[in-house]
Image: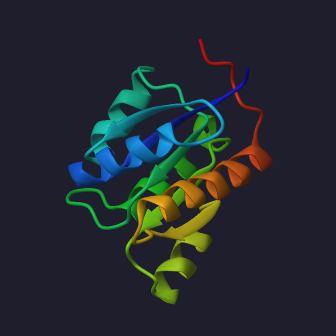
Amino acid sequence: MHGFSLTFVDDNEAEHFLIQEAVGDLAVPVRSQHFLYADQFLESLERGEVTQDAVITDLNMPGRNGFELIHALRARREWLHLPVLVLTTSAAEVDRARAADLAADGYFVKPLTQAALVEQLGVMLQVIRGRMTPSPLP
């Protein structure tokens, strides 16, 4: 069975826990990795320690923020193929527009309930599926 390998970048550890729970409720297998900082993720990606089908990032983080992460991913030819989705608390149109200008593949506002998060992750997987072919999970 094919599944997805996703990387989540968000400085809020509680969000990682909620996302991990939601991932477990999806109908398709998902392997997930979590990073608290964009630079930590980029360094791991540079060293080849991270393999993923897509990146899901928050916007508001210390150090390199989500916009800067998207820019860094889009600036490298070898990472252009990666779908990048935003999952944030910001519903501001200016943030949506900026993410789109940076070539983010999707923009999602963090929902208030766990059930809504599971549903939203399902929609995200559809966006990702449209950009790539999932890799087999062990």
Determine the residue positioned at 58% across, 42% down. Answer: 26
Camera-nearest residue between 38 and 130: 130
Position of residue 10 relative to residue 30, above or below, is below
Q: Is residue 14 left or right of residue 18?
A: left
- Give the image's coloring scheme: rainbow
Q: Residue 33 at what x, y percent from top left? A: 40, 33
For residue 23, side relative to residue 43 (left or right): right
Q: Which x, y percent locates residue 135?
A: 69, 24
* 98 left or right of 101 in image: left
Q: Nearer the viewer, residue 50 or 108?
A: 108
28 sits left or right of 12 in the view: right
Residue 96 spot, x, y in % from top left: 54, 78
Q: Nearer the viewer, residue 131 or 16?
A: 16
Quarter of the figure that contains the N terminus: top right
Q: Residue at x 31, y 40 (%)?
A: 35
Whether residue 11 is visible to the viewer of this picture, yes or no, is no
Question: Measured along the vertical axis of the image, is residue 16 above or below residue 108?
Answer: above
Q: Position of residue 89 (x, y in %)?
A: 37, 74
Residue 73 seen: yes
Above or below 33: residue 106:
below
Q: What residue sits 59% from the left and 59% below the top?
A: 119
Residue at 25% over, 45% down: 36
Residue, far bottom: 93
Taking depth in this image into account, of 5 and 44 the one nearest to the observer is 5
Q: Quadrant of residue 20?
A: top left
